[in-house]
Image (cartoon, rainbow, N blue to C red):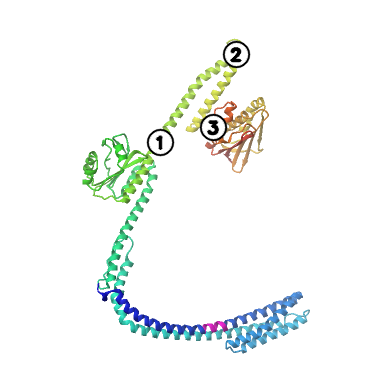
Amino acid sequence: MSPRNTVAHVLERLVLVLSVIILLMSVMSVVSMITVQREARQTTRTISPLNEQSGQMRITIANAQGSLRAYLLTGEESFRRAYVASRSQFDTGEDVLLTRAADAGMDERAVDEFIDASQEWFRLADAEMASSEDATLGLTGPAFREVEREHGELTAEIADVRQEWRDRYNLYMNGAIALMGVATLIAIFVTFSQARRALDRLARPLQALHRVVSRHEPGTTPVRADVHDGADEVIALADAFKALAESNASMQRDRERRLGLHRLTGSVPSMLTARDGGWDRACEVVGQGLQADATSVYRLAGEESVALMGSWHSSGADFPALLQDVTIPGVAQMLVDTPNLRASSAADIDATFPEALARVAEEQSLQGWALHPLCFGDEAVGVLSVATLQPHQWDEGELQAMERVAEYAAHTLVEHRYVTSLEDLDRQKSDFTATTSHELRTPLTSIAGYLELLTDGDFGDLEPAQTRALDVVARNVDRLRSLIDDLLLLNRLDSGQADTARTRHDVRSGPVRVVEQLTPIAGSAQVQLELEQDDQPIHVWGDAQQIERAVGNLASNAVKFTPAGGSVRLTTTRVGDEVRITCTDTGMGIPAQDRERLFTRFFRASNAQAEHVPGTGLGLVIVLTIAEAHGGHVELESAEGEGTTVTLTLPACD
């Protein structure tokens, strides 16, 4: 690197010459600015105060006119004092206005004429003030218009003076600019030779580099700047920029690629859960995003085989399921032990993949292949296959995308397996409940029939002890029949097979029938049963029998759990678009720790079990199921030892 061809040498000479010129121009600039500043300060200190004082006096005489008119109209003393104050203020401002006009070098005739006109108006105003009873403003009106005219001429005169000062200020400015222009021309002439050298060695090469940088877009391949005639540092800078631009372009492409893959894989979960062709669509999206030729997802069908879930091929034709008919001993364990089995060429496939898979790759002419296990925890549930017909180097972004897709697919497979298992269990439970309930009803019917025959004495007279024993049997038969009926109803409601006859009906009829049925039971238990309902019809859309069954469950529970001397109140009201059927009792209440589980099948509160109150734990479950089937809900409030309130809410029907 030649010392005379360096940036430092070129700039040293240029800086030296420019420093001298800048110093001279700075001195000239300071002198010009001081002169201009002095003129501007003089304008600010004279013209602006003069204009302000003129306006203030115009406001003062206007205020005096307003006070005069108000006084003449009302006769109030306060307006007279305001007028006197305004006149005093105007008299004081006359001297100030004259002084400021003199400071501004202004012709004082306009000021004197304005003051004379104002004084004339004040004289006439004083006369009208003195004869306020006969005053009509006829004298002061023309005089005030004369004041306004004179003030307008005064304002115009001030504007002319301001313009004169402004013209003089512009003259100084133009002179300063002209002086600076001359100095600039001299500076250009003096520095021309040094500037030309700097231009040849620095500016032009840097401009060439700047044009290249300006045209450069992130992520594109940079163009090399032709700066071979520039300073050594400029040439080195151009080379460094090209290297940096190439690196940034590579990083930008990589970021965009990863972001695109991340967005692409983010749409996969919704596709996997679609019912028709979702897995094939997901394979297509993943294959196109990874620029692959074939993509497939398999689930494990045993220890040595897999089953196809979905596939895609770039040609659009059916692509053979690579692993469908291949027996791979220990494939499940292999997938767990091998985080990612991949190869970038046919030779890599032969060296990396098991022999059975290598044969498949050779048959299908695969050049690149990646197998990613679908793992849920420590369990392998399937495998993702991505293959190419050309050698392909799998980058980090593609591997991460495959990992995300594999995770989504694994969760979907496990979820599908769990859902299928739960559906099978639910179906088996429903079948078992229905079969068992029907099978139990036959012997119960027979038992009930024979109980009735025994009780009626068809088999002979009974002893009192025998009668009591048969009563116990009859009660337990009723409990079993009630349990079976509840189970069958829940089973039909859950499966959607319950007979429904939804109509628009007055919901008040249900609570009436429930109260009629429970009144004897409540009376024998010494519990007061009350019914409160609106006088007007309350209509709902639903199955009247099911709603009555729900209300009956609430009321019978309340009577059952209320001790002798207590009360149960059943109310039906409409609130806005809702119908609320509320059952309130003064019974034993429900412990706080049991309330969250009250709507769980077969669950019974701990205090009910301790008191040996009979029940199945299905009553509230049936109420909730019927309410939700009708678009409603159930709310429960309870305090142990005080009572319980349950509200069944249903949509109203107009």
Quadrant of res 133: bottom right
Q: Pointer 3: what residue?
A: 622
Depth check, mark 1 against mark 3: the one in front is 1
- How many neighbours does mark 3 have within 10 angstroms: few (below 14), some (14-19), or many (20 or more)? many
Callout 1: SS: helix
29, 531: nearer the viewer: 29
**Placement of the N terminus among the 4 image quadrants:** bottom left
Where is residue 215? Give x, y as percent. 32, 66
Mark 1 vs 3: CB contact within 8 A: no
Q: Pointer 2: what residue?
A: 466
Q: Pointer 1: what residue?
A: 418
Position of 247 relative to 147 (above/below): above
Disc 1 from disc 3: Cα separation: 27 Å
Mark 2 vs 1: CB contact within 8 A: no
Mark 2: amino acid: Gln
Quadrant of res 20: bottom left
Q: Which segment is the magenta one? A: 39-46
Disc 3 from disc 2: Cα separation: 36 Å
Q: Earlier in the sequence, mark 3 or mark 2?
A: 2
Q: Residue furthest top?
A: 460
Where is residue 469? Give x, y as percent. 59, 16
Where is residue 396? Give x, y as percent. 31, 51
Q: Which mark is residue 410?
A: none
